[in-house]
Structure formats: C-alpha cells, structure tokens
Image: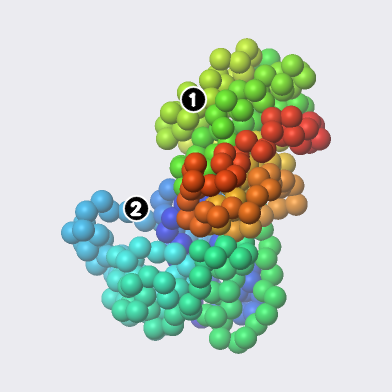
Amino acid sequence: MKVCFARVDRIGDFILTLPCQRAWLSVRPGDSVEWLLSEKVRFVGEHISPAISASYINEPQTFWKKILESFKLSTKLRSKGYEQVVAIHIPWWVAVAFFMAGIKTRTGVASQWFSWIFFNKRLRQKRSLAEKNEALYNLDLINFALQKGVNNLPIVPGRITSNKSTAMAWAQKLKKENIDLNRLVVIHPGMGGSARNWPPENYKKLAELLKAAKVSVVVTCGPQDDHFVRETDILNVKDVVAVRTESGEELLGLLSLAKAVVVPSTGVAHLGASLGVPVIGLYSPVRVQSPKRWAPLGDKVQVLVPNVQCPGIFKCLGEKCPHYDCMEQITVDSLMSCVMDKL
C-alpha cells in the first residue's frame, strides 16, 4: 500500500512527527510511505537519516490562491496513487486536495471543522490538555489509522545529519574568530512567540558568566529574532560572536559543532536534539506550552521549567497569576551549572 503522511507546519512539529514512519513500517513493512510537508522544513527533510521521500508545498496567502493551489495539488496527489493519507496537521485547502484526489482512506483528527467534510476516518484528541508529548499524540493517530489496535508503537527520535563540508566550513570560520571548538556553546535566544521565553537580560548574564569561564559563545538569530536579541543586549558582551545563518543547512552545520545549545521552546531545540547535540531547553509551565508536550526527543536533552502549578492553559495570565513572573525561577546560575556539566 502507498501511504502519505501530511504535516504542513513548523520545524519542531515535523521533527516530533518523524517517529510515525518507523512506527507504521514496524506494523506494515511492505508499505511505501511518502510525506507532504511545508517548504519551510525542506532542509530538515533533506537531512533526515535514514532518508525519507517527501514533497513540499508553500502556503498561499489569499483564499482564491488557496483554492487554485488545492486543485493543482489534487492533480499531483492523484498521480502519486496514494491509497491512504494520514493528515497529522494540515490546513483546510490541503484537506480539500486529498478529497478531490480521490484517496480512498483519509484519516485525521476530529478537532478541525473541515475534518467532518473531507476526512472519512477521524480520531478525537484533546492535545490542548498536554497530557503527553506531541510525538505520542502523533503515534496515537498512526495507531488509529492502522486499525489493528496496536499498542506501544516505537517512539524512535528522528535523526538528522549535517553536511560535513558545511560543518568544516563553519569550523574554519569560527577558528578565525578565536572560537575554541572544544568549548563551544551556541545560544539561540529568539523564538516565534508561541511560548514564553526566559527574561532577555538573563541571556546576557549567562553569556558574561560563560566568557568569564573561558567558554566560547556563539549567538544565532534569524530575522524574526532580531527584536528579542536586541532586548537581551547579549551582542555587547565582549568576544561573543553573532551569527546569522543564511540557510537551514548552514544552521545545521553550526549546531553540529556545539558542545551545548541553550535555547527556548523553538525549532532550534529540536534540530539540536536530532543532531545528537546536548540541548538545554528553557520552557514555560503554561499548559499548551509545557515541555510535557513540546520537549525535544533525545537522550542529550535537558529541560528547565519553573516549578509552579501554572493556572494558564493557552497563555500566561501575566500579573493576574500569583506565580508571575515564574520564568525568573530559572536562574542564571542554575543554567550556567547545566551548561558547564556538558563541557
């Protein structure tokens, strides 16, 4: 049987979906599995080991462009000859394309309005309860699609490999900046804003402590991170090297050299974990933002989260909360200790 797994969203979400392929093939080893993914995660899909087969799409910006792209996509999907699709997370216009492509079995979650129109197999899930990791929610959907009552599907973290030549190029550049690759810590302070971050001034204090301990510090950021990075003032710490990677492949090459990566809840945390690099993640206790659901997978991941009974479900309640600002409970000294343990 030819099966399509569809997850059209962000880097971390996709990486937490990777265990689905191995789980499916552990039950139906003769099937052929292909992926439909966002163009934004192409660089991840092209560096997964073992390799996956995937198609990539962009998100149209207007309603009528979405309709047009839906028709185009349905033609492409029909030519693929899929017998089943498991829609882990997709926008409505992709669901329309699966329907128009005439794919016999279309499985997805029941929480979206379009699920009741375009899917013929629906699983009720309350992911907002954040009772387990996102990867386990994804495997529940796979188990449902298999229709065999399979339990304990394997949750094998996805593995990513960086291009050796890219990593070597970074190594040469960093050595010219007097970076000690044996004591290299990458700090990625920015994030998309879907979760709470550590207080910005703490990132600067951490960098100062690391430099005092003769640790090389590289700060990475993208265009969406600029505002927060400026707030941290971390780039004014003497001998901290700022890096703006031009591509996802460059980011992977840089991360692969790190002895530790310090990062809030963002895709970079999942990239580092999948590369096998020690990751220290800074997480919010808000229910839908918590590490219980969004922590990266891997045996070199350490998560720090405030030890409070957070009343927030979808967002921080701010000054209305008796624990505000609980993110300050993650002290600079405690994080410094975690980093030094990795070196």
Mark 1 neighbour density, 10 Å: few (under 14) some (14–19) many (20 or more): some
Q: Secondary structure at mark 1?
A: helix
Residue at the spot 28% in from the left edge and 76% down from the top edge: 100
Residue at the spot 52% in from the left edge and 43% down from the top edge: 196
Q: Point out the image quarter for the C terminus.
A: top right
Residue at the spot 54% in from the left edge and 74% down from the top edge: 141
Residue 231's tag is 1
Residue 179 or 231: which is nearer the viewer? 231
Residue 58's tag is 2
Report whether 319 appears left or right of 255: left
Q: Is residue 13 visible?
A: no
Amino acid at pointer 1: Glu
Report whether 59 appears left or right of 121: left
Corner quadrant of residue 91: bottom left
In front: label 2 or label 1: 1
Does residue 140 lie above or below 177 as drawn?
below
**Residue with the most extreme left position:** 64
Q: Position of residue 333 (x, y in %)?
A: 74, 29
Q: Secondary structure at mark 2?
A: loop
Q: Earlier in the sequence, mark 2 or mark 1?
A: 2
Q: Position of residue 235 (x, y in %)?
A: 55, 19
Q: Is residue 102 visible?
A: yes
Q: Position of residue 205 (x, y in %)?
A: 65, 23
